[in-house]
Amino acid sequence: MTEMTRDRLVWVEIPATDLNRAKKFYEAVLETSLVENDEGPQTMQMIPSINGAMCGHLYEGKPATAGDGVTAHLSTPGELTDAMDRVKASGGEVVSEVISIPSGAFFYAKDTEGNSLGIFKYSN
């Protein structure tokens, strides 16, 4: 088997019962603009990555119940304490303290729809 040269995570789809509310939340927390895409059967809000590609999207759907489903980890360019403030101010919930790992640090949160997420900051 040849060595993989691409990220193992290809895409993330995040369900939202209120797509506009979720869009505002993610734009505030990630400090970026989501890109509307209505080319498919339903409108999506695309999450841009650093290199200009898209790494996932929000769509109108039913989030998993608390404790179920996956946790999407998304990076922020700013400080994690500021991101925690943005999560709270945008209607989400911070559910952990900052956790340090060798490549950076993150905290767990819930978005406005109840989805589990991690907000990550790379080490310099």
Image: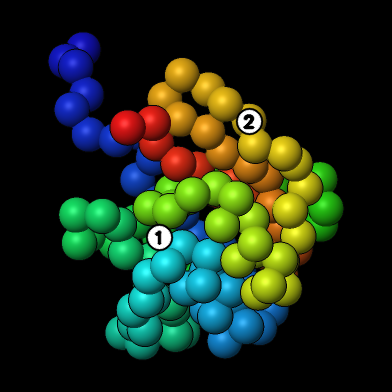
The correct choice, above or below, for 1 with respect to 123 in the image is above
Quadrant of the frame with the C terminus: top left
State the image coordinates of residue 24 (x, y, percent, origin top left).
54, 80
Give the side of residue 105 with respect to residue 41, left or right: right
Give the amino acid type for the residue marked by disc 2 in the picture: Ile
Q: Residue at x 52, y 33 (%)?
A: 105
Q: Residues within 10 Å of mark 1 (few under 14, many from 20)?
A: some
Give the amino acid type for the residue marked by disc 1 in the picture: Gly
SS at mark 1? strand
Q: Earlier in the sequence, mark 2 or mark 1?
A: 1
**Which of the pair 124/69 is nearer the observer?**
124
**Which of the pair 26/39 is nearer the observer?**
26
Q: Residue at x 22, y 59 (%)?
A: 53
Q: Is residue 77 visible?
A: yes
Count the marks: how many?
2
Name the residue furthest right. 66
In space, the residues marked 2 and 1 are separated at their CA atoms by 24 Å
Image mark for residue 10: none
The residue identified by callout 2 is: 99
SS at mark 2? strand
Q: Residues within 10 Å of mark 2 (few under 14, many from 20)?
A: few
The residue identified by callout 1 is: 56
Q: Residue at x 42, y 25 (%)?
A: 103
Q: Residue at x 57, y 87 (%)?
A: 20
Q: Quadrant of residue 39?
A: bottom left
Give the side of residue 56 with respect to residue 91, left or right: left
The correct choice, above or below, for 35 with respect to 67 in the image is below
Q: Are marks 2 and 1 in contact (CB under 8 Å)?
A: no
**Which of the pair 93/85 is nearer the observer?**
85
